[in-house]
Image (cartoon, rainbow, N blue to C red):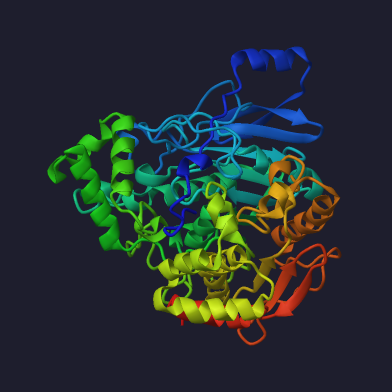
Amino acid sequence: MFPAFAPHLDRRAFLRSFAFLSGAAVNAARAQQTTFVVAETNSGKIRGIDNQGIKTFKGIPYGADTSGTNRFMPPADPPLWTGVRDALAYGHSAPQRDPAAPPPAQGAFGVAGQGLPAEGEDCLVLNVWTPALNDGRKRPVMFWCHGGGFASGSGSSPDTDGTNLARRGDVVVVSINHRLNVLGFADLSEFSTDFAASGDVGMLDIVKALQWVRANITQFGGDPNTVMIFGQSGGGRKVETLLAMPGAKGLFHRATIESGAAIQVAGREIAIHNAEQLLAKLDVRKDQVHDLQKLPLDRIMTAYFAVVRDSPGVDQTVSGFTPAVDGKILPQHPFYPSASPVSADVPVMIGCTRTEMTLFSTNDPAAFRLDDAGMRARLTDLLKDQAPPIIDLYRKLNPGATPSDIYFLVASDYRYVAPTFKIAERRAALRKGPVYLYYFRWETPVQGGRLKSPHTMEIPFAFDNVKIAARLTGGGPEAMALADKLSDTWIAFARTGNPNNPKMPRWPAFTTKDRATMVINNVSKVVNDPLREQRIAISRALNLT
């Protein structure tokens, strides 16, 4: 989510505050004769709202508070309750703010961090949108994993509200919050066997939420045997990691990966090194590691950000506080040296956007007005001595492109496109579940069109939320028309494991022979290996052979 070669990216631009629905607001809603609905869960009854036929429940606990003695431990069951618990407001976002940083500015362009509730360690909560309760129907379940790398974001972003998707597709939508960054992925296992799972507890939280779905979703009109996990950016990486986790096997039946490229996650040596650095920043000896459960949250978060700052240029997607291969919870990297065989039968839909990296340069205006020398300097930093031939190739294949265009295309292919295509290749090589590959080329008109097809672009189309996310899509007729097609495509894949539907051209499964790719635009079409020369050149630069 936060590429190492994007030095101008402001992490705080993805973290937003959004106040809880207060008791006064709840009373006002009741005074306006809001229709409330009650659902049963295995922890107790909950009260939600009927929003023009879509029943909405927010902030449902699927796990216990993760503070104190639960910190760095696998998720525990939430406490049972009596009576009816209100599920009317989003629960806590996972802790992700640097205590030393000023409050983030409002109006971010990103999606995962837009309009977030307050943070807290009692963050194992989920949200449900459904057309009906306990009616015996077996609706597909679309289980959303939010973006923000493994460090930030929330399932409570307004842009990923599930109302429109549930209404359009007669599906049940679930989004979740879970532990992130240091609290979800600090590998303390070398210092105490009590913390054997600490390096992956953020992923175990997601497994816990999927177990909640299996146990409860029938009460919400959903089918526990037709669950699609989907996510974008860091959420896509979470989906890829779940595909490699034995503990998640059987809890989902389709997987959609949007602009997530977790060929590898953290290795054990890196994870342990990060944990040692954390203890050093906190002045805690290794034999006192349990003291971390007693320290104030702000101290831990301050130390975490200090460790990250002391690792400039490090790619936090594989070297930061992220899931780690431990041989048990995560036996191998998701797609290295080959695709994990754990959930090989699950159909996969995967793709990326054409100019992913324009999003990360919204605070870097110089990136949009590069001259040739500036473009070459940036790409030399990225590609070293391979920069000149790759630049020449991209100039040949993109006549009339500006230096900034070339920079964004090469950087996007390097960070996202080539790894995504390699993941599709390695997954297809398992010869089990089908793989469907897409390449998103639709260009947003916002900001004068300079962003073209940025990172996060497909989210509002999949959720049918292009009006809600108008700052990203423009919200115009073209966007609405494309959302009509793409939302139905995501729904079709959730329902059947095959994205084909009457609104899109026939979409064959990807094979290493034909490399069929759905190129998404106002008029979409299937092209075999649409970026062949670029794919080969960038894959060589990345050593993705």
As drawn, is 462 to the left or to the right of 153?
A: right
Q: Is residue 135 visible?
A: no
Q: Where is residue 215 in the image (x, y as percent from the top left)?
A: 57, 45
- Describe residue 412's horizontal placement relative to residue 541 as left or right: right
Figure quadrant of residue 391: bottom right
Please identify the quarter of the rendering in which residue 89 is found: top right
Left or right: where 6 falls relative to 127: left
Q: Is residue 326 visible?
A: yes
Q: Name the residue located 61 percent from the left edge and 73 percent from the top edge.
A: 433
Q: In this view, does 260 lie above or below 465?
A: below
Q: At 60% across and 15% down in the image, what residue appears?
A: 23
- Residue 344 in the image, given as x and y percentages of width and height: 54, 72
In the image, 212 versus 410, the foreground residue is 410
The mark total stands at 0
Residue that protrudes farthest toward the bottom in the picture: 513
In this view of the protein, which residue sits in the foreground, 509 or 533? 533
Closest to the observer: 281 or 165?
281
Give the camera-side residue of 517 and 78. 517
Q: In this view, does 343 lie above or below 60?
A: below
Q: Which residue is drawn at the image coordinates 21% and 35% (left, top)?
A: 291
Give how far across and how far down residue 279 sits, in percent. 21, 43
Q: Give the quarter of the image for residue 475.
A: top right
Q: Which residue is drawn at 46% across and 50% down?
A: 8
Position in image of residue 407 (x %, y %): 55, 66
Q: In this view, does 369 lie to the left or right of 527?
A: left
